[in-house]
């Protein structure tokens, strides 16, 4: 699991780097308003995209089950259904993103001085949705097969390309935040193309033949059964974070820029969690398919412990270096102050964030994706939003209260996950 997770960690690191490159270059070349526009975009982009990422995770579980069971025929069917779904979803997301962008930006109270640039960034970004979604589905196939190295190679290449295009489009062509979004989508599309070429050439059960790409209804139902709860879970979290973003927007563009800069830093802390979660889900799915429940349980313990320890260590480092790290994006004192306010509240509780996501990854790999959906819906959405509204109505307006909802809801969800996990029987988990 560790050797499988390490390339994932490096790949996620490069992906986070090229996401962060937008904010770094925008903040330094275009100023605080542009940084606020790009930062506010991240929350809403996650809300719209995360559902479809959940479907890709569901496809990975189904493919992993069949690979573990050494069922070549169903592996092929699942692989080609996954590719077809990625193409259809990419088209749908392009349309939805472009149409819904103005509505969502106004719903979260985006300040008028930031609104035009936010709108430009969104629409350019969503125009390239098919590349992003297809890449996630294609790499999901490789990870389900236990290959975490090739996605890393392609991602490194596209990450470097994104940084170069960011500088060229913004500094030399003067394209503003639209240039940053264009650089991102071109890089994501390049990753998808490279991944597709590899899958079409490889001699393995998960080989992709362009002539066989189509939807197989029974397999799609299996993918939906696993993927939709995960997608709903992700979208609900994204929706709750959109509400949080609206409360942050109340404090103005400096708060938006500061919180956005912190979020980019937090993304790096989240990398070990994401990497081990992917490895854990694949490991559990393959061992359930191979009918080895004891090995699945043993792997789950390791997959929970490692990200918890690593995430907390990273949290301590960010806690200590928060002022310097946030200043890399924007050295304006107000921006740094708002970013530090978020860091001081959240970073020392990263172990709770890691534990909750690791538990969700274990249950997803075992085919129980409905459970983490319910738990995170309850605590990361209903409780989180309720706490925000209660604080806004009964307490003095203070961004500290907005920041505090994160560790509180992480902790509550951890309690619920632990209760369920202690009663869960891996021997009763079935192939998806």
Image (spheres, helix red, strand yellow):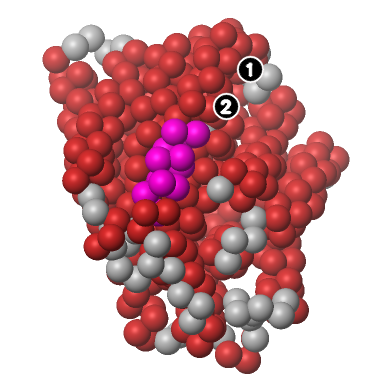
Give the image location of residue 97, x and y in percent: 46, 58
What residue sits right under mark 2 in the picture? Answer: 265
Residue 322, located in which quarter of the rendered image?
Answer: top right
Q: Earlier in the sequence, mark 1 or mark 2?
A: 2
Examine the rendered structure and indicate whether residue 11 appears above or below residue 341: below
Give the image location of residue 376, x and y in percent: 27, 42
**Magenta region, mostly helix, strand or loop?**
helix
Please tell me which residue lies in front, 77 or 120: 77
Give the image location of residue 224, x and y in percent: 34, 70
> What's the magenta region?
296-307
The reply to whether callout 1 and callout 2 are in contact (CB within 8 Å) is yes
What residue sits right under mark 1 in the picture? Answer: 325
Helix, strand or loop under label 1? helix
Tally of marks:
2
Q: Residue at x 77, y 42 (%)?
A: 163
Numbered label attached to residue 373: none
Camera sees residue 364: no
Q: Residue at x 23, y 50 (%)?
A: 424
Give the image location of residue 387, x and y in percent: 20, 25
Camera sees residue 326: yes
């Amino acid at each position: 699991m560790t050797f499988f997770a390490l390339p994932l960690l490096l790949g996620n690191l490069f992906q986070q780097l090229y996401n962060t490159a937008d904010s770094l270059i925008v903040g330094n070349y275009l100023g605080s308003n542009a940084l606020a526009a790009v930062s506010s975009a991240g929350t809403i982009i996650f809300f719209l995209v995360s559902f479809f990422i959940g479907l890709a995770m569901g496809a990975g579980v189904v493919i992993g089950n069949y690979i573990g069971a050494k069922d070549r025929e169903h592996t092929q069917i699942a692989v080609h259904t996954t590719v077809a779904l990625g193409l259809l979803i990419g088209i749908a997301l392009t349309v939805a993103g472009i149409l819904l962008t103005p509505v969502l930006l106004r719903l979260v109270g985006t300040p008028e001085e930031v609104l035009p640039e936010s709108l430009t960034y969104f629409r350019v970004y969503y125009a390239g949705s098919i590349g992003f979604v297809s890449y996630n589905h294609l790499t999901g196939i490789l990870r389900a097969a236990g290959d975490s190295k090739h996605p890393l190679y392609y991602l490194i290449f596209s990450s470097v390309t994104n940084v170069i295009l960011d500088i060229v489009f913004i500094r030399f062509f003067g394209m503003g935040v639209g240039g940053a979004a264009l650089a991102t989508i071109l890089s994501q599309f390049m990753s998808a193309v490279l991944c597709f070429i590899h899958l079409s050439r490889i001699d393995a059960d998960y080989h992709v033949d362009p002539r066989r790409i189509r939807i197989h209804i029974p397999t799609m139902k299996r993918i939906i059964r696993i993927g939709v709860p995960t997608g709903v879970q992700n979208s609900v979290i994204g929706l709750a974070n959109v509400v949080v973003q609206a409360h942050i927007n109340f404090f103005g563009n400096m708060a938006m820029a500061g919180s956005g800069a912190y979020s980019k830093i937090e993304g790096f802390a989240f990398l070990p969690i994401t990497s081990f979660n992917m490895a854990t889900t694949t490991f559990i799915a393959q061992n359930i398919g191979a009918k080895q429940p004891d090995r699945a349980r043993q792997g789950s313990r390791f997959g929970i412990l490692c990200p918890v320890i690593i995430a907390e260590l990273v949290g301590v480092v960010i806690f200590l270096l928060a002022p310097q790290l946030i200043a890399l994006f924007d050295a304006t004192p107000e921006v740094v102050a708002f970013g530090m306010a978020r860091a001081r509240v959240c970073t020392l509780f990263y172990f709770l964030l890691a534990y909750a996501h690791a538990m969700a990854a274990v249950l997803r790999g075992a085919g129980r994706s409905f459970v983490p959906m319910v738990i995170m819906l309850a605590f990361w959405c209903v409780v989180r939003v309720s706490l925000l509204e209660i604080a806004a109505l009964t307490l003095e307006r203070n961004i500290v209260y907005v920041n505090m909802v994160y560790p509180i809801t992480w902790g509550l969800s951890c309690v619920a996950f632990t209760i369920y996990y202690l009663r869960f029987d891996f021997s009763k988990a079935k192939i998806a």
